[in-house]
Image (cartoon, helix red, strand yellow):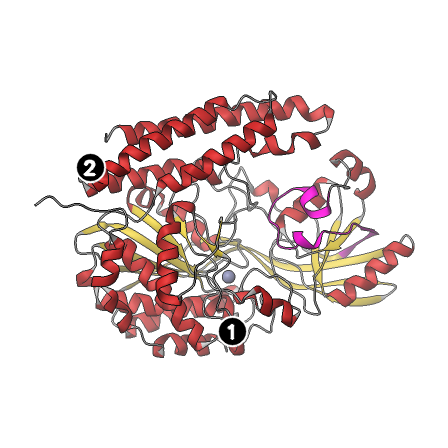
Amino acid sequence: MIMKPEICSMREHATTDSNILDHITLDHAWELVTTFSGKERWRPDDVNEAGEMIADRLRALGLPVEIHRPTVALSVPLSASVTLDGEEMFAKPPSSSKSCPNGVTAELFYLPAQKSSLRSYNKKAIAFFGEGVGTDLEMREKVAGKILITEGFGNPALAAIAMEWGAVGMIAVNPGVDTHWGTCTTVWGSPDLDDFGRKPTIPVVSVANPIGLKLIARAQAAATEVTVKTEMQEGWFEQAIPVVEIPGSVEPDKFVLLHGHYDSWDVGVGDNATGDATMLEIARVLWENRGQMQRSVRVAWWPGHSTGRYAGSTWFSDHFALDLDENCVMQVNCDSPGCRWATSYHQTTAMTETHTLVADVIEKIAGKTPVMQRPHQAGDYSFNNVGISSFFMLSSTMPDDLREEKGYYAVSGCGGNIAWHTENDTLEIADKDVLLTDIKIYLESVWRVANAVVLPVDWRATVAELQVTADKYAAASGTAVNLSAVQGAVASLAESLDRFYLGVEQGEIQPKAANEVQMRLARIMVPVNYTTAPRFTHDPAITRAPMPLIEGVMDLAHVPAEMINVTLTQLMRGANRTAAALIDARRLVEATL
Ligand SMILES: [Zn+2]
């Protein structure tokens, strides 16, 4: 009999194996949530203790756990303040702020931010400050030597802009009465020689809204000097990474990577004790049912997320780079599931090729149609430069109307609860029912990827999206940059993929070969769609548009005359790299036809 695997053959698995969900209990998960609700997990020693607590629970459940102990770069905030007229006011320094315990004193420069940009990771002054913002040259004249104050979070892209303008300090005015922790570096994980120079060289602080408004009012009324102090603990620290490998019985080398951070700000219940608990329960259930699993699942709990800008996952990505390249079929990130009121899936992170899978799982488990978001260059997405198809980061969140009703502003975790990255992220932020739903969603989707005969990814969807993007870029570019090679390469790849998937459906291409092609496609397509730096390095923590090597064509109108030829040269090289990658992708697909 000839097997006829369908692309959505995971639907069959869903029916035959749906009893996997029946194995879930909340006992172990909730015990970890409550334990972590009393355990601060951001200072290096506390983080290691928490890592051991996870490992102890895994061992007690009979699971084999391996603990890696890499040395990674961390920047731990100790204290910060802003002093105005002799009054010292409370502030928090984001991780990787420059440590200035003696303070930096300078005049404030207030630049209002757009409300919509508060969560932006794009490094574009226009995105933060609107069309009216001056050119870099003009802004340097205004900001150099001053302390930039603006609304927002202590954000890496914002800090990078402030530094480029020559600011000697930055104050981010948070939207509410709480002061949020965060990070302000664009360096991804522990730095190497190429990127350590991007670590902020100025003190950056976040202040609560009432303090910020006071400072802004003074800056608007007259030239006002303030002193910004920051104290950081910085260096290289050994941190524990507990990992559990649950072996598949048919293709044990191939694996799904399920991962999330266990270090947190303060006791971080919604971000991310709930995620740690989700992964604990999934590891337990998968281990019990490993006999039925085709591929392996590797579950990893990361340190260094909050104070090392993803240093744990970055180390793992570097240390196991070739294994990931050879064998990892999908990475699934688990951050902030199971939070209070988070019953909506309208900001679900997923790469386009996984949309069908993710939507199908969420519809089945939660009875809701998710709205997908392109992954930001954030979370522990430390695998884009290797090139691994990915889904989830944040999955569930509270509905928009509920958020408005509560007067909440947008945050980047805790299911939309504004306790995110504050000392208020305590046990009340977790919700047992939502946690159970999210555990089911994560388990079902990981189970399907581990078991689908043909990997449940559809590159036609990604390429269709790239076609629209390429056309949009070409229209914006006009004759400035010739993007016809990119457009042609995308169209050819689309055509090859149609024949490839038909071949798979008709059984002419065997599942093993189909899976290898789909995985190799990820190694080409994820980098070309999300990164600019080479494979096996790490892009800066700045979110980029699709095909980032050529996204700059959309901003040509704002490029000052003196920079236009430099910009066009960059874009021409970017177009070549993009087109060449797409041609490689097509060659890969064609080889199977
Ligand atoms: Zn998180």
Camera-nearest residue between 202 and 299: 299
Is residue 9 at least partly visible in the picture?
Answer: yes
90 over 461 or under it: above or below: below
- Circle 1 sits on which residue? 340
Residue 154, by quadrant, is bottom right
Task: State the extent of the magenta-drawn residues as a range.
Answer: 103-130
Is residue 421 at least partly visible in the picture?
Answer: no
Camera-nearest residue between 476 and 212: 476
The type of residue carrying mark 1 is Arg
SS state under label 1: loop
Tally of marks: 2
Residue 140, x across and y down, in percent: 78, 38
Q: Is mark 1 within 8 Å of ligand 1?
A: no
The type of residue carrying mark 2 is Ile
Q: Is residue 117 left or right of residue 317?
A: right
Residue 515, x across and y down, in percent: 25, 42
User: Residue most toward the left?
Assistant: 1
* C-alpha gap between disc 1 and disc 2: 46 Å
Residue 121 shown in magenta: yes
256 over 402 or under it: above or below: above
Residue 95, by quadrant, is bottom right
Mark 2 and mark 1 in contact (Cβ < 8 Å)?
no
Q: Residues within 10 Å of mark 2 (few under 14, many from 20)?
A: some
Q: Is residue 341 left or right of residue 57?
A: right
Q: Residues within 10 Å of mark 1 (few under 14, many from 20)?
A: many
SS state under label 2: loop
449 over 561 or under it: above or below: below
Residue 553, x across and y down, in percent: 60, 30
On residue 199, the disc is none
41 over 103 or under it: above or below: below
On residue 509, the disc is 2
Residue 156 shown in magenta: no
